[in-house]
Amino acid sequence: MSRSFLHPYCKHISILAIVGLSLLNMVLGQNLLPNPDFENFSSCPDANSQLDRCDDWFEFSPSVDYYNCGYTGNPSIRGTPSSGNGCVGFWAQPLNNGACPGGNPPFFKETLAANLLSVLEIDSTYRVSFDLMIDGLGSFGFGPNSCANFGFLFYKSASPPAIDECECESFIPQILISADSVLQGTYKSFSLTFVADDNYDAVIVGPFCSDDSDSSICTSPGPNRMYFNLDRSYVAKDTVKIDTPIIIMTDTPNASFGISDTVICINECIEIFDSSSGDEWSWILNSDSILSTDSGFNILCIQESGSFKLKLLIEDTSSGLNDSSIKSFEVLPEVECRESLFLPNAFSPNNSNLNEVFYPILKGNWQEYTIEVYNRLGELVYKSDDQGVLLNKWNEDRYTVSNVYTYIFSAVDEQGQTIRKLGNITSVK
């Protein structure tokens, strides 16, 4: 199969610090994108995968999410506009997730498209601006990493490119950035230019493969999937007059990691999935104890109960810059772990022998036991009415349409009281 080749200027993204912005004079023409901030709609979205309710945009590969009218998604995936009320959301995942059988390398991606308001002129320079972030509210994805790019591919509507939602492509979008330059939970504004080499009249927007998409770090278990929010897109003919700007280029470190669970029992361990970049690592527990300075630190075992915060501090020795990321988790005391019912909120089916399966931990005699598991599309992927302790183990390898699931648990306890619980399960690979 074909694979993509990352643009040489997009492999490693650096910070551009422009001193004296008053000296930069930018003149932009008409925005060629219809409904560029996704505000206009035919009807309000009330569930995910409803891009068809957004005016002027359409799915090029399913299933893009549309957010407006106060609808911001579910606990797994969220959509937060950078301004106004509307935005779109889509995810990229380099691992084969069941929706992409036989991909080599598998790379599931969601993209949307629109017809431009006017045709691009050959040899003219166009500026593409947009606000982009990686969702920091939901539990679906991880922070920035180099396992995907994000781009704008301009094309002729009479001969659209063949994009397989499950495979990498050989072409390179005219506008392309590495996902490790995007912030998590905070919008970042991007503005780039390209010279049109044809009279394009349409554009595809979304995740694309990177040079790392088929690397071992991206196709092995770890924090390699991302959910993007896009808002305030702009495509226009560009005229930039630069008098005397001073441009300073510096490398920037990136702290990004995930953990296998947010609630564990005392004496259990948490797996750490690190995709950070920089020169020096410091793992700090509760802001006062340095656990390790090893970039390969991946297991944390706790022998006391309580609430904990694990902080990763990354430093770049040449520039003096640093970045940090914090994950919170809770360790339950032994007495709570001995209670008659405990439902974990995450598991990691990655052959590490830690948290490999999801199952309710039951003690005592239970009656009319039922558990149902749904994927992000609302499809039932698992159901059981078996009773007993440590039964109904469910391994995510069987159901990988999504990596965030919702469970509904119902049972009658020894006292005849009906217990009903609703929650999310996150699989961490």
Image: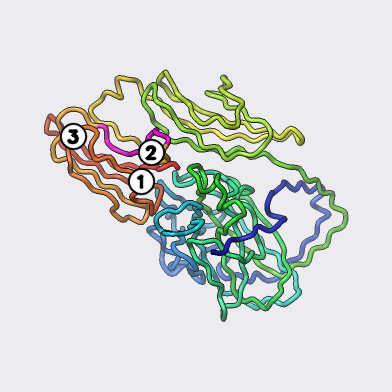
Residue at numbered disc 1: 396
Around disc 2, counting alpha carbons within 10 Å, would you say few (fewer than 14), some (14 to 19), or many (20 or more)?
many
Tell me where residue 267 appears, x and y as whole percent. 39, 21
Q: Which residues, given as a range, are shown in magenta? A: 352-361
Q: Left or right of 64: which side holds 160?
A: right
For the residues bearing labels 2 and 1, Cβ distance under 8 angstroms: yes
Residue at (55, 46) in percent of width and height: 216
Q: Earlier in the sequence, mark 2 or mark 1?
A: 2
Q: Left or right of 358: which side holds 187?
A: right
State the predominant SS element of the stretch in magenta: loop
Residue 356 located within the stretch drawn in magenta: yes
Image quarter (top left, top right, bottom left or bottom right) of the C terminus: top left
* Separation (CA) of disc 2 from disc 1: 9 Å
Residue at (18, 44) in percent of width and height: 385
Q: Earlier in the sequence, mark 3 or mark 1?
A: 3
Note whether 156 is above or below 59 in the view shown: below
* Separation (CA) of disc 3 from disc 1: 21 Å
In this view, the residue in front, 41 or 159, is 159
